[in-house]
Amino acid sequence: MTGFNPFRLNVGFIAAEAVGYQREFDLAVASMRLDDLEVRAVQGVATVSRTARGLLVQVHVEADTPQVCARCLKPFHQHLVADFEELYAFNDKGLSEEGLRYPYTGILDLAPLIREYFILDIPISPVCSPDCKGLCPVCGADRNETDCGHTTATTDPRWDALRALLNPAGEA
């Protein structure tokens, strides 16, 4: 038995409507898995419009996903936002460059697209907050919680001669 998927939309009736017909679908779920991506507190809306070429789907969806901070290594929830627009064409003549076709079942599964856009929104090095100080490279202490006294400023001794020219003796 498959679980509930709020991203599967029955849009068959929209294809039978006149050009210009539009319908909004609420996308809301407490938590779910999109293949390898766990999302929580999902909120959004999908607007499906009937066009001459097919069904235009406009989606705005937000969610949180568990991540580990790249600086302090603590778990946190990364907020994700996906905004996209795709055309599901009725025939090959109306295909867009994405190549999405209107399914004969009349049911669109937006989960793969939403997963893809969410993954694109995850930073390469996620951080729990912009001012996270991270871990001390000397002792490993969390600098957000304690000041271990170690400094990270290291100078390359090869630059000492140039540094002496910039700051001659006797000047501050």
Image (cartoon, rainbow, N blue to C red):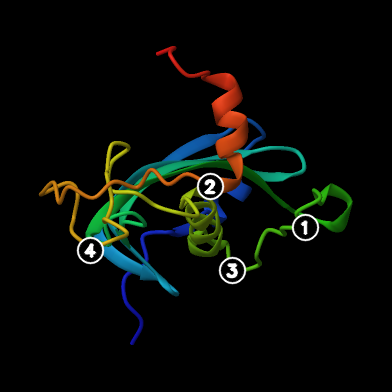
The tag earlier along the polypeptide, 3 or 2, is: 3
The tag earlier along the polypeptide, 1 or 2, is: 1
The tag earlier along the polypeptide, 4 or 2, is: 4
The quarter in which the N terminus is drawn is: bottom left
Does any portion of residue 41 appear in the rendered image? no
**C-alpha gap between disc 3 and disc 2:** 66 Å
Residue 111 horizontal side relative to residue 91, left or right = left
Secondary structure beneath disc 1?
A: loop
Nearer to us of marks 3 and 1 is 1
Question: Label 2 sits on what residue type?
Answer: Asp
Nearer to us of marks 4 and 2 is 2
Picture residue at 49% right of the left edge, 48% below the top: 121
Nearer to us of marks 4 and 1 is 4
Secondary structure beneath disc 2?
A: loop
Picture residue at 43% right of the left edge, 59% below the top: 7
Labelled disc at residue 156? 2
Question: Label 3 sits on what residue type?
Answer: Thr
Nearer to us of marks 4 and 3 is 4
Secondary structure beneath disc 4?
A: loop
Secondary structure beneath disc 3?
A: loop
Rendered position, 127 above or below 160: below
The tag earlier along the polypeptide, 3 or 1, is: 1
| Residue located farthest toward the right when viewing the structure as drawn | 93
Does any portion of residue 65 appear in the rendered image? yes
Query: Circle 4 sits on which residue?
Result: 139
Labelled disc at residue 99? 1
**C-alpha gap between disc 1 and disc 2:** 55 Å
Q: Are marks 3 and 2 in contact (CB under 8 Å)?
A: no
Residue 144 horizontal side relative to residue 21, left or right = left
